[in-house]
Amino acid sequence: MSVIVTVPHAACPHQSDPRRCDRVSEQVARMLVGVLEQQSCQTILHINDSVQRSVVDMNRKVSRTTEWRKQLRALFETEQIVYHIDVHSFISDDSKRRQVLVYALHEWGTKSLETVKLMKALTPRGELRYPIYRGGENDIHREALLEYKIPSVLLEFNETAEDAELGKVTQTLGEWICERIKPTD
């Protein structure tokens, strides 16, 4: 039984164009995988570091024909995936969002109960708010949740956060997720 962590926007063209990729998503994903493995959770890290978002956005349905999405579907079908985390990052370009370290998105009107539970678990553990916003199209999250019935969360991490802050939140996330998926006797 494995947790799969996906990073669809890790391919960055160059530093001067900040909106074409998620600058800290791969770093955060690797931190999270480290915590999951420390907690003895099996993990699969699936990073798109070759196809830039300007070529095809891996979150969109049209990307299902790409090799990266085909590989992801194969993992959903052949591995015993018990949890999916889709990792993104955002540029904190306004004062309200600067106060947010991580937020979750509800996709496709699903109001994933898993997302609500996860964010409630994070809220009392830190001084920063962990809100849930209504998101747009995310076909990876939708596919995991609705087509493969895998609990799935989509998380956006603040690109201006300090490494220590990101480390703290990934520690909490990893511990909570591993506790959540442990088999019950």
Image (tube, rainbow, N blue to C red):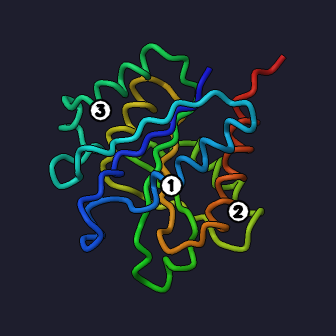
Q: How many marks?
A: 3
Place residue 91 in its image quadrant: bottom left
Q: Residue at x 29, y 32 (%)?
A: 68
Q: Earlier in the sequence, mark 1 or mark 2?
A: 1
Q: Are marks 1 and 3 in contact (CB under 8 Å)?
A: no
Where does the C terminus fall, quadrant-wise? top right
Q: In the image, what residue type sits under mark 3?
A: Trp
SS of the residue at dot 2?
A: helix
Which residue extends farthest top?
78
Residue at image mark 2: 123
Residue 180 coordinates in the image, percent (x, y): 72, 35
User: Does residue 24 sit above or below 48 in this rendering?
Assistant: below
Residue 142 vs residue 127, the one in the foreground: 127
Q: SS at mark 1?
A: helix
For the residues labelled 1 and 3, the Cα–Cα distance comes to 19 Å
Asked whether the beta carbons under mark 1 and mark 2 sit within 8 Å of each other, the answer is: no
